[in-house]
């Protein structure tokens, strides 16, 4: 699918603000893919569709995840996590994207997972550092992403986990497992 066609498709699903975020993620993901030697076209497609399901009703996302029977563990955690696996499923059934690399980058863009692929890491980090993101700590992750994708990802995970702890919110186990796995790899 061409870039313009994909953007037009996703625009229908999103608010103006979320669409602007998506374009930022796309541009950032393409840069990261070029920098770290990933498939640029796959990075572009995964970025464009990563938040495809963001505005689906909670009940619909839940049903999609139950029907798919793949990422059931997210249902015990905050519904903010649900649009990632629900999106991977919908992008396949509604848009016709079948590339498993692209679909898994969408599926794990909020939670991460131990043993993330290069493309998954790129979408996770691009989602975190796109130019519209302004939260505390984002500049540090941006600077790390200039040189080392794993260090950027570790810092992004660390910030996310800390943020959740401070808000007294549960942390999805795979997010901690992703952090631990990356630290271990670096030892
Ligand atoms: Fe998202
Ligand atoms: Fe996003």
Image (cartoon, rainbow, N blue to C red):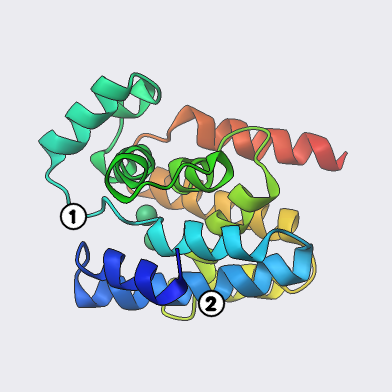
Q: Is residue 69 left or right of residue 176?
A: left
Labelled disc at residue 122? none
Where in the image, quadrant-wise, is ligand 2 located? bottom left
> At 65% from the left edge and 65% from the top edge, which residue is drawn?
40
Quadrant including the C terminus: top right
Quadrant including the N terminus: bottom left
> At 34% from the left edge and 47% from the top edge, which residue is drawn?
91
**Numbered disc total:** 2
> At 65% from the left edge and 75% from the top edge, which residue is drawn?
31
Labelled disc at residue 27? 2
Alpha carbon separation for disc pair 2 and 1 = 22 Å
Label 1 CB less than 8 angstroms from ligand 1: no
Local crowd at mark 1 within 10 Å, few (<14), some, or many (≥20)?
few
> At 78% from the left edge and 62% from the top edge, which residue is drawn?
37
Task: Give the camera-side residue of 174 and 64.
Answer: 64
Local crowd at mark 2 within 10 Å, few (<14), some, or many (≥20)?
some
* Res. 82 image quadrant: top left
Q: Is residue 54 visible?
A: yes
Where disc 2 sits, the SS reads helix
Q: Is residue 16 left or right of residue 117?
A: left
Q: Is residue 133 visible?
A: no
Q: Which residue position is annotated with label 1?
A: 55
View extreme (right): residue: 187
Q: Is residue 45 left or right of residue 65?
A: right
Task: Give the camera-side residue of 85 and 140.
Answer: 85
**Residue 177 x %, y %:** 60, 30
**Residue 47 x %, y %:** 48, 62
**Residue 84 x %, y %:** 37, 44
């Amino acid at each position: 699918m061409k870039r313009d066609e994909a953007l037009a498709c996703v625009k229908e699903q999103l608010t103006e603000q979320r669409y602007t975020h998506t374009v930022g993620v796309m541009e950032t993901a393409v840069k990261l893919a070029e920098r770290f030697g990933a498939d640029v076209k796959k990075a572009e497609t995964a970025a464009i569709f990563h938040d495809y399901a963001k505005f689906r009703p909670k009940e619909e996302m839940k049903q999609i995840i139950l029907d798919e029977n793949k990422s059931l563990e997210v249902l015990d955690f905050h519904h903010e996590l649900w649009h990632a696996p629900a999106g991977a499923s919908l992008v396949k059934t509604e848009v016709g994207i079948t590339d498993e690399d692209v679909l898994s980058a969408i599926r794990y863009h909020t939670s991460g997972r131990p043993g993330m692929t290069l493309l998954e890491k790129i979408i996770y980090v691009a989602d975190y550092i796109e130019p519209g993101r302004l939260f505390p700590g984002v500049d540090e992750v941006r600077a790390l992403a200039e040189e080392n994708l794993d260090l950027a990802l570790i810092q992004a995970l660390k910030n996310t986990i800390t943020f959740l702890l401070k808000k007294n919110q549960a942390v999805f186990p795979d997010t901690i497992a992703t952090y631990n796995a990356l630290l271990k790899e670096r030892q």
